[in-house]
Structure formats: C-alpha cells, structure tokens
Image (cartoon, rainbow, N blue to C red):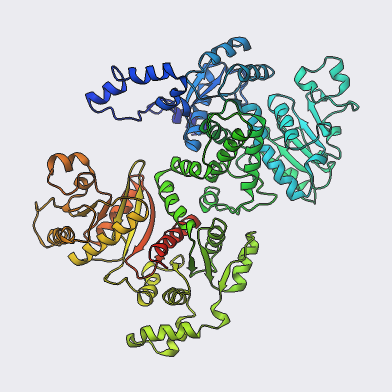
Amino acid sequence: MGLDEDSLEYHRQDPPGKLEISTTKPTNTQRDLSLAYSPGVAAPCMAIHENPDDAYTYTSKGNLVGVVSNGSAVLGLGDIGAQASKPVMEGKGVLFKRFADIDVFDIELDQQDPGDIVRSVTAMEPTFGGINLEDIKAPECFEIEERLREEMSIPVFHDDQHGTAIISGAALLNACDIAGKQLGDLDIVFSGAGASAIATARFYVSLGATRENITMCDSSGIITQERAEAGDVNEFKREFARDVPEGDLATAMEGADVFVGLSIGGIVDEGMVRSMGENPIIFAMANPDPEIPYDEAKEAREDTVIMATGRSDYPNQVNNVLGFPFIFRGALDVRATEINEEMKVAAAEALATLARQDVPDSVVKAYGDQPLQYGPEYIIPKPVDPRVLFEVAPAVARAAVESDVARKDLEMERYVDRLEARLGKSREMMRVVLNKAKSAPKRVVLAEGGDEKMVRAAYQLLDQGIAEPVLVGDRDRIWEQSQRLGLDFDPEIVDPEEGNLEAYADRLYELRRRKGITRREAGELVQDGNYLGSVMVEMGDADAMLTGLMHHYPSALRPPLQVVGTADGVEHAAGVYMLTFKNRVVFCADTTVNQDPDADVLAEVAKQTAKLAERFNVDPRVAMLSYSDFGSVRNEGTAKVREAARRLRADAGIDFPVDGEMQADTAVVEEMLTDTYEFSELDEPANVLVFPNLEAGNIAYKLLQRLGGAEAIGPMLVGMDRPVHVLQRGDEVKDIVNLAGVAVVDAQENGE
C-alpha cells in the first residue's frame, strides 16, 4: 500500500480517528458516580459560581486547549471546509498530548465570516484554558487572532503564523552564530507574503533583525513602496514594502545573507543561490517540496551553506511541533492571559540554546544514529527531543511572569520537577534522586572512561552538579573524544599508562594475596579500569564507581565484589530494577546476581531493596513472591520463601510491612489482599517484589518492561560496602547519569 492507503487505514481502524475522552477519577462504585455527577457535582458548581477562578481548581480547564479551524487553508490542500479539516485538528491534539500532556477538544467551525468565528470562539472561553487557531486563511486570520486576543482573557495563538516564525527564529539565531554574522546586519529576503511569512518577518524584527533590511516578495515580485502606494498589496504586506526598484525574486536574492522561503517548491535555482552573499543562510520551508532541494543548494557553492527545510528527511527541519505544545504548556501553567512577544522570543532563545547542548542517545537513535552535533547540519533540536519541554515551557512561563501577563507564579525548580512527572513516573522518581545528589555531589569513578558515552555522561554530571566524575582511561583518547564532541569541560582523568599506581597495587595485593594473587599480578590488574576503580573506591580516593558498559555483567561485577565487597553484616549483593508505570512504582529483586538464593539470602535481598526504595522517597511494602499463596503449596521452593518472610517479620530492626509467600497478582492487586487475604501484613499492594530465584526475577522484569509498558531503571546493585553499580552493555548516557545519581545518594547516606 502507498502512503495514502496506509493513512486511510490508520485513521479508520476501530475506533475511528485519533482521540478519545478518558476519565481521570474513579467511577467504579455508586459513590464514585454520585461524586462525579449528581448530586455531588453541585458543590464544585457552586464554588465556581462564587469564584470563577475555581474552575482551574475543580475542572480540567487549566489543561484544556481548543484547536479551532474553519478549514479555509488546510496544510497544502487549500480551502477544503471545516469537516474535512477534522483529521488535521485531531492530529494537532495528538501532538499536544504526546509532547506536553495537554488535553484538546478540536473545534471545526463551518463559518467564513471573521466576525462569526470571533463570536463563536469567544463564547467558548469558559471551556478552555487556551485557544490554538489553525489552518485559517490570510488575511482573515490576522483579524481573527487580533480580535480574539483583545476580547479573551486566555492565551490565543495562531500556529500557522507564529509557529514557523519561532522555530525558524531559533534556527536563525544559531545560523548567525555559526556563520559569524550579526542579526541586525542581515539582508533578509522572503519568498511568500502570506500569514506565515508576515508573522515570521515581524518575529525576526523582535529578535533583532532590522526591518529596513527585509525584502519581501509575492507572486508579482518585490513588494515595493510604489506597489503599496498603488494599492497593489494589502495592509499586511504594506508593512514590509521597501523603497527600492521593482524586481523579481532573483533580483532580491542578489547579495542577500538570508533567504526565507514560505511559498512554493522549485522557484529557486542554483544560480540564485550563487548570487547570495558569503556563507548564505537558506530556509526553504515550502512543503512538501522546498523552494530549492537541499542537495542542490549545498552543492551550488563552495563556502558554507546553512540550510533548513520543512522536511524530516533533511537536516534542520523547521517543525512547528517544537513550539506550540511547550509554549502552551508554559502559558497554561502560569494561567497567562495571552501569549505575547516576550514569551515567543523566550521560546526561540530556549530552542537555540538547547541545540548547542549534547544530544541524548534516544534522539540520535530515532534519527538512524546520524551524528547530531551543533553546527551547520544541526541548528535546531529534533522534535522528539524530550528536553524541549524542560527548556521551552519554563522559559515561556518565566517570560509571562516577567511581562505581567501571568496570573500565577511558579517556583521554577519545582516546576521542572512537575514537567518531568508529565513525561512518566520514571523521570519523576529519578528527579527525586538527582536533586538529592545535587545537594552534596560525590566523586564517582567511571571505570570505562575512554568510551564516548562515559565522556558525555561525565560532562552532564559535572554540568548539572550531580557528581564529580573521575574518568579512568587513556588521557589522549578521552581528550580527543571531548574535543570531537564539542564538550567544553575539564574532567579529572586517571590514566593507568601514566604510572603512579603503586599504592593501588599494594592495596590490591594486600586484599587478595590469600586469594591467589601475587604482587606482580596485582600490579598488572590495576592497569584494568575495573580493578583500578574498585581499589580507588575501597581506599576512599573516590566515593562510588560505575562500570559494565563494555563488559559482560558477571565479568564487570567480579572486580568490585573481590575488592570492595559487601557491607558489614551483608553476605550477598543483589541487582534491583525499578519499574515505573503510569501511577505505580515497583522494585524487582534479585534480577541480576543470585541464581538460587536460600531463605537467608532472600531476607537479606529484601532488606537491602527496601533501603533502596527509601532513597527514592518510597515507603517499602515487601512481598516475597512464589507460585503459592500462604502455604497453599508446600515444597522446598515455597518453603524457603515462606521462611524468609517469617524471619523478616521476626526481625526487630524491620520497620516496613512484609509478607509471603504469595503469588504475584496477590501482591499487587488490592482487592485480593484486602478481600481474600485480609490477614496479610500488607494492607496495600506491594511495591518491593522479591523473586524466589534469578530466573524468575529476570524473566518477570523483562516481561513487565516489554509487554506491561513499564520503564526500567537499573540494575542498581544493593548490599555493597561502598556504592558500586554495574551498567548493562548498550545503556544510554541518561542511564549512566541516572545510576551515577543513585551512587551519589548511596555515598551520601553511607557518610562517604
């Protein structure tokens, strides 16, 4: 099937369309329904009647945007009518929800008169926290947006005008930086004079461009003062009329620094590109075909051409999804009365700044593992970059507060935490740990310091104040990696080839001489990053250690077990995964270390995992799992689990509820615990699940991750004398940073 047929099938699958309404409160009992509707709903109704602002407290208004269109200018399809525009408006709702967790009602109005549209939308103000106008033709769209902004006290934003302006504005800021040009000096040529082009030209002026240096061309050529005086252009085009001779687009482009295409494909040729000034900036944003193909523009000249298009198959895609979800997120969260110029500028500047930072592995993978590094081929972030939410929304919210259009202030640090939570429970949980780590950063050895991911992780750890990384590896290789990646930092490096390891070799020999290690062998072993890092931690020259990125898990675990060992009173370490679901967190142990633990080991694993849960501010409730419920099956396998649970309950030092043996569904389903097994020590579902053996634990966490939709953080090693964590081969930079944060908190609590 072709793309059209694929799309039709995608949209017609049951249920048709792309959006649905779901409930956010319980509706299982008669009482639930009486609270949701009659008679209980009367109370919030009267509260809002007495204080209209309470609508933000008792309803979804504060997170609800109306996406409004009359279908008069839909994508490249033209005036296809209100009903035919509905798939696009639903799609806009999908993007709002996917990228910024904003709910949407799409509103398709079968109206053409601007006054009718204004009256209809204004009448819906009690419903929405903001209005996104979409696919309304020019020049009517200018009047509609302006009147709505005047008459409504909630944000109104026409994305066709301002979205491209903001995203391409961010690209322009970085293109100027790379090309060594000043925004105010740029000679800018526009091809196209519709709503998007006029809004973009206005926005470039807000960023610092000089209005007199902007030349705008429509289908009749350069918009000149003479044409304006003759009444040949409308009032909006007249704003950019220049007192210059008449001419066509080719004439306008001669010597220009910047070309901005918001017109039709194929109207610019290589000769026109060659006529431009040195190191030209070309934004050919017509869709689906740009004004000039990417390759032709790049090949037209020998100097640097910085090129952006509206297409995802070329570098530097100007995609509006980088803007509107996050702009509305920030505006809604401070209850802004409008989206003003200061907020738009803040969004563009935040995007430009983000493009200069190291790119997460998840984004690189989404784009086929292409190198993504600030430069001519990467001047704006990719749409799937999750960091856009944390950069743009706070910048917009801050600008709203500072420009006095916000009705609610925010504590920005806590606000970022809330935004993290919108992207998933795992990010919320990790934010707890990373904030703890930042309060007192510790020295963390990255044993495989020559690996690119370790270098990037070290940069982020230092830049964010999470830890003081120590990279173990070849100094020249680490510096080469740092330079190539454009990371401006000065990491601490321990290079085994540089010698000065005698003290570490002596200590390793002292620890292992009765384990078959000679002094000469100890000297050789400390050349290995895993042994060297382990001895550094054992001797107190570092507070924690990470390894395993390039090694099989057992071989990476062996050196720290031999050198650092387990904590006092602990005989066995264990591997734990934290699995996060939409509204639940569970810790699964042991998933990586102990193959067939006995009752003593299971009890030990449970205690250590409970301590780990507490580091994430989770009150542990421990279930010792089996395929039997409280003695329903009696054999050697169930007996050891039952005995482990008994020992834990008898332990005076245990301050958390624990029970077992029990089946997995008994442990996590509240009704089974409270109705069938009301005698259980657990009065709420368990959040620490201790499996009877490694096989069960490893299988279970992977199934929950792959089929249950859980996000997994780990494995986190518990029970060690000093904080050591072993990564999985193939882990991403964010995984390294997260485990380093866990290691720092471990060290803080150990008093390191």
Q: Position of residue 154 (x, y in %)?
A: 55, 23
Q: Tell me which corner region of the image, top left, top right, bottom left or bottom right, holds residue 146.
A: top right
Q: Residue at the location (59% across, 34% down)?
A: 401
| Percent of width and height locating residue 2 | 52, 33
Please tell me which residue is depicted at 74% across the width and 40% down the height of the picture: 282
Using the image, determine if residue 380 lies above or below residue 553. above
Percent x, y of residue 97: 47, 33
Q: Is residue 173 above or below residue 73?
A: below
- Looking at this view, is 63 or 242 the one in front? 63
Residue 236: give x, y in percent of width and height: 75, 20
Q: Is residue 562 left or right of residue 640?
A: right
Whether residue 288 appears in this view of the structure is no
Q: Quadrant of the C terminus?
A: bottom left
User: Could you say which quadrant of the image residue 672 lies in?
Assistant: top left
The residue furthest right is 245
Q: Exactly how many numbered labels are in the figure?
A: 0
Name the residue at 59% across, 52% down.
Answer: 370
The answer to whether one can see residue 145 in this image is yes
Q: Quadrant of residue 668?
A: top left
Q: Is residue 306 above or below residue 46?
A: below
Of residues 579 and 431, the one drawn nearer to the viewer in this rendering: 431
Q: Residue at x 38, y 18 (%)?
A: 45
Q: Residue furthest front?
A: 50
Give the answer, above or below, for where 110 lies relative to 129.
above
Q: Is residue 679 left or right of residue 92?
A: left
